[in-house]
Structures are given as C-alpha cells and as structure tokens.
Image (cartoon, rainbow, N blue to C red):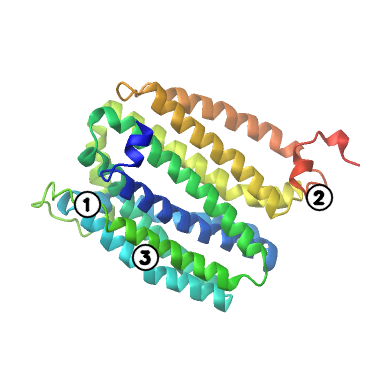
Amino acid sequence: MFQQLMTSRRFAPIFWCQLFSALNDNFLKNALVILILYHTATEQSGALVTLAGGILIAPFLILSALGGELADKYDKATVARTLKLAEVPIAAVAAAGFILHSIPVLFVALGLFGVMAALFGPIKYGILPDHLETRELPAGNALVEGATFVAILAGTIGGGLAAAETNAVGLLAAIILGMAVLALLFARAIPPTGARAPELKITANPFTSTVALLRDLRLDHRLWVGGLIVSWFWLVGVIALSLLPTLTKEQLGGTPQVVTLGLVVFTLGIAAGSVTAARLSRLRPNLALVPIGAMLMGLFSLDLSWTAPGTGRGGRAAHPRNVLQPPAEHP
C-alpha cells in the first residue's frame, strides 16, 4: 500500500509538499543553532538555541485552530498553494540573513516559517480523508508522520553541515530558496478538495478559536485523551530536539557531528515507530497504540534523565565514534 500511495496523485503531491516544507523549517533552525553555538558563541548561546526551537513551535499553539478553520472554509489545496507561495519571500528573508550574517534576521525568518507551518499543519492531515479511503488512512498518516521526522533529520543534518562551513552562506541561501520553490511546485499539483464548510465564519481572535477547539475536543473523551497524549509526544520531541545540541556541546564536549549522530538516532526511532504503528493498524485505526506508546516514551525519558548527568567526558567526545565507546576505552 505504501508504494501505491507514493505513486498516486491523490497523495504524492501533499507528501512531497509537506516534506520539503518541514525540511526547510528544520534546515533553517539547525543552521541557526550551529551558527549560534559554534560561530557566535556567547554566554547566552544555550538560551538562544532554546529560543530558536520555541520560536518555530510557538505559532502552533496560537494559530493551529485558525489553520483548521481555513481548511474547513476554503479548498484545502488552494490554501496549501497560498501558504507555500507566501513561504518563497520568507525564504528570501532567511537567505538575506545568511548573506548578511544577521542572527536577528534569521530569527525573524524562523518565526515566519513557524507561522506558515502552523497554518499548514491542519491541512496536511485534514486533506488525507478527502483523498484516501479509510483503509488507506493508517498508511497515509504513517507516511506523513515518518516523512515529517525524516525531514527534521535531513534538514537538521543539512543545516548543521552547511552552517559548519564558514564560507557556505551562498549555499545556505540557495538551499533555503530552492526547497521553498519545490514545496510550492508540489502544492500546485495537489488535487482540489472543495470547501467543506463555506459558511463557516473565521474567528478573528486566534486565542478564542483555540479555546473553542479545545472545548469541542473535550466533548469526545477518547479524542481528548488521545489529543493530550499526542501533544505530550510533540512536547517531549521538541524539548529533546531543542536541548540535544546544548547537551552535546556542554555535557559531552561534542562537535556538530556528534549533534548529528544524536539526531539521527532520535529520528530513526520516530520513523520506525510510525511504520510499526501503520503495520499494527493496517485493518483499521488502533487508538490503543497511543497510551502504550506514551507509557514507553515516559519510561525511556526517565532513563535519559537518570543517565545523562553521568555522561560527561571532559570534552573527549569530539568524534561520534567516541560517544559509542564505554568511558573506560577513552585515553
């Protein structure tokens, strides 16, 4: 079924559109993180790295409900094309930030990318039931979820490697612009869905729409609990991805390559979990997997909290190979 979906015009354009979009977001974020940590290191570097993750994610809390209203009122394909078109000039702002070596300009571009991603999020999931059959939804969701984290991995690695080169500003700018254009091209190929609720009134205050959305969600206990657990999953993921670069540099004494290794392991685990969930839900969506996954994630989070304070190696983890060796093997 995976291969069938990937060659279908019902699914492939939205898949590649959201992949390049997420790739661009994380490419910019990690390039900015590496620039802060290794090229403009200050006493506030750790705080700025955490701020970068927060700026990209914060719009989801404020604007996701608005994105859902737009997806209901208008044709989802049209909204997707509009958002991806708006991302091209934002990518130009990011490119200017790299060329000018301006951290503030890059933060502005990152925040604007976060706004576009928050508005696009409800579309990339909400459009799947419009174009896929019920039996195809677990596989479609798994592909989108897995691709999101593969994009996080690839964007993070690419951004880190490119930013590690002091003379790569032109390459950084070209990649940011190129991926924005690719996302737009695939968005233009998404089949129309029609407006599901054209009479819907858009709430001017995003906080009001967010509160209303949460109130409606609480009316269905299963969806409410599932939503809380999924939100917790994203919270843990964001915290882990935001703190990993600082932990690697300050605790392990590692280089950007060690940061990349940690991100590879984390993201491959996400992709493997997405595929496993799709396999277990191949006949119908299985909500029982959500609390099971949440409990396992909690256990491994506790394990990380117990082991991380004892992993300091006095700066001897400069190479990824050293991180995988027991401490006794270090000279």
Residue 174 screen position, x and y as percent: 50, 69
- The residue beneath circle 2 is 315
Q: Residues within 10 Å of mark 2 (few under 14, many from 20)?
A: some
Q: Nearer the viewer, mark 2 or mark 1?
A: 1
Residue 21 screen position, x and y as percent: 41, 56
Q: Could you tell me the amino acid type at mark 1?
A: Lys
Residue 74 screen position, x and y as percent: 16, 54
Work out which quarter of the rendered image holds the C terminus and state it. top right
Q: Earlier in the sequence, mark 3 or mark 1?
A: 1
Viewer-proximal residue, 95 or 190? 190
Asked whether residue 97 appears in the rendered view, the answer is yes
- 4 relative to 286, above or below: below
Viewer-proximal residue, 83 or 68? 83
Residue at left 37%, top 65%? 87
Viewer-proximal residue, 75 or 302? 75
SS at mark 2 in the image: loop
Give how far apart the Cα atoms at labels 2 and 1 are: 50 Å
Residue 54 screen position, x and y as percent: 49, 55
- The residue beneath circle 1 is 76
Left or right of residue 150, residue 252 in this image: right
SS at mark 1 in the image: helix
Left or right of residue 320, residue 15 in this image: left
Q: Could you tell me the amino acid type at mark 3?
A: Glu
Residue at left 41%, top 40%? 145
Location of residue 88 by image quarter: bottom left
Q: Earlier in the sequence, mark 3 or mark 2?
A: 3
Residue at left 62%, top 47%? 244
Asked whether residue 42 appears in the rendered view, the answer is no
